[in-house]
Image (cartoon, rainbow, N blue to C red):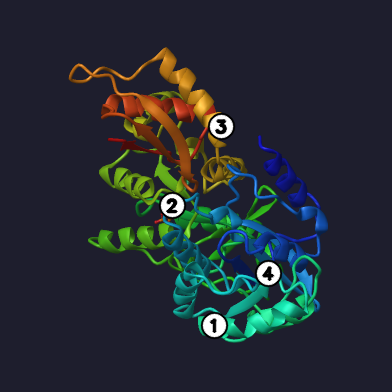
Amino acid sequence: ESEFAAWEDGLDGDGAFEPTVPTPTLAVVGRPNVGKSSLVNRIIGRREAVVQDIPGVTRDRVSYEALWGGRKFTVVDTGGWEPDAKGLQGDVAAQAERAMLTTDAVMMVVDASVGATATDEAMAKVLRRSKRPVILAANKVDDERVVGDVASLWTLGLGEPHPVSALHGRGSGDLLDAMLAALPATPSEFSGGGNIGPRRVALLGKPNVGKSSLLNKLAGDSRSVVNAMAGTTIDPVDSLVEIDGEVWRFVDTAGLRRRVHQAKGMEFYASLRTQTALESAEVAIVLIDSSEPLTEQDQRVITMVIESGRALVIALNKADLVDAERREDSNRELERDLVRVQWAQRINISALTGRATHRLAPALRTALESWDRRIPTGRLNGWLAELIQGTPPPVRGGKQPRVLFATQAANRPPTFVLFTTGFLEAGYRRFIERRLREDFAFTGSPVRVNVRVRE
Ligand code: GDP
């Protein structure tokens, strides 16, 4: 693992923050080298948190908890969203777009010693459309001489520029006060950019597989948690549920809790709920009735999860109705019917008796870890070179395509891009995908592999 990951783990373990209490989130955006990370360190008041801009180190959604004026909030350093080289303006705009969508307020950092560049303007343009408050930080105002340049930043149309020196700390108190004034007291339903708070789970399955029973069983066991969190701003359509000592946010469960049952011919609405729940979830539990053969409808739900790119855990419910002999047969059948989601963990549970429901939590954790995972580029290419040496791509039209390079373009779900000199057959692509899965243990998460042919 990279040094960074180890460092991040250390942060998680310091216990200074209760991760289950949602706090408003601020994203710090700006083009490279304006001093975002230094400013983040000023805000969180943690000197040792300085991370140098090491090329190739991907830092996606690095978030920290902060305390100022008696208020807790979460700061997201968007450094890791930065583009490599080309298409800078477009990518910076995308960074701003993403920050807007996932956080409660945005702080845009500009280098006052340089002034507003075309890239700054592109970003400001996106932020002006935002419904979120935007605070403009004019950084690198290290001494009196630069102060005069700050006024020119009004042209960005983001309101008053706040002069600050992340290096010396000058002006940071005023900037933080302005930020607190802009930040809502409680997080909006959209924020989650800091990835703080319970992880979001969609409970899915065709009618009558036991979704309400499972939710009620789990919620019944964790009533105290739900009460303790009554003062927080969890969307009322969601349920907070404790499993195995951890609180999870089951999204879009209002219908389930009210035990509203779909009448015949209402499958359309069931699939609509599945779609909505998936959109707000990070991981899905697909419930299957293991006392009956798998149906077309079960498969459709699974297809929706795969297409959504969310992580997946399969729960085989009504295990209490299946005797040992039947289980062996049904396991064999499931093995065959669920071959396309071999990568997902399957757990036998009974929503009725509560049997093994605590085992859902470890499976959810594993799936989310896979879903979040990033493979460093160096390690990925070392692995790829070895794989290709052992099994080179098949020759096509007398030519052998070469795989030049691979990179993980995204996580959630892990998405890889292979750069090649020619077309790679689907079979070979699947081979690479399967080995990626096996060798890097992406249990519970879809993995996507795209190929770019370099002419
Ligand atoms: P939903 O439509 O998916 O929400 O399904 P329900 O939770 O309403 O369950 C449908 C029926 O299956 C109800 O009669 C439940 O009592 C029953 N059921 C749910 N889970 C289990 C289980 O684990 N074992 C058994 N034997 N019955 C169950």
Residue type, numbered disc 2: Lys
Q: Residue at x 30, y 64 (%)?
A: 269
Front residue of 117/218: it is 117
Q: Which residue is mark 4?
A: 229
Helix, strand or loop for disc 1: loop
Contact between marks 2 and 1 (CB within 8 A): the answer is no
State if disc 1 and disc 3 touch (CB < 8 Å).
no
| Residue shown at the point (57%, 44%) measured from the top left | 360
Kind of residue sitting beneath label 4: Met
* Residue 172 x %, y %: 76, 75
Residue 158 circle label: 1
Query: Which comes sooner in the sequence, label 2 or label 1?
Result: 2
17 or 76, nearer to the observer: 76
Q: Is residue 317 left or right of residue 427?
A: right
- Pick whichever of labels 2 and 4 is earlier in the sequence: 2
Mark earlier in primary sequence (4, 1): 1
**Tag nearer the camera, 2 or 1:** 2
In front: label 3 or label 4: 3
The quadrant in which residue 165 appears is bottom right
* Picture coordinates of residue 238, whole percent (x, y): 52, 66
| Tag 2 residue | 86
Which amino acid is tagged 1? Leu
Look at mark 3 in the image and give the residue it sits on.
378
Neighbour class for label 1 at 10 Å: few (<14), some, many (≥20)? some
Kindly tell me whether residue 95 is visible in this rendering.
Answer: yes
- Neighbor class of circle 2 (other Cα within 10 Å; few <14, some 14-19, many 20+) is few
Disc 2 to disc 4, C-alpha distance: 46 Å
| Mark closest to the chain's N terminus, 3 or 1 | 1
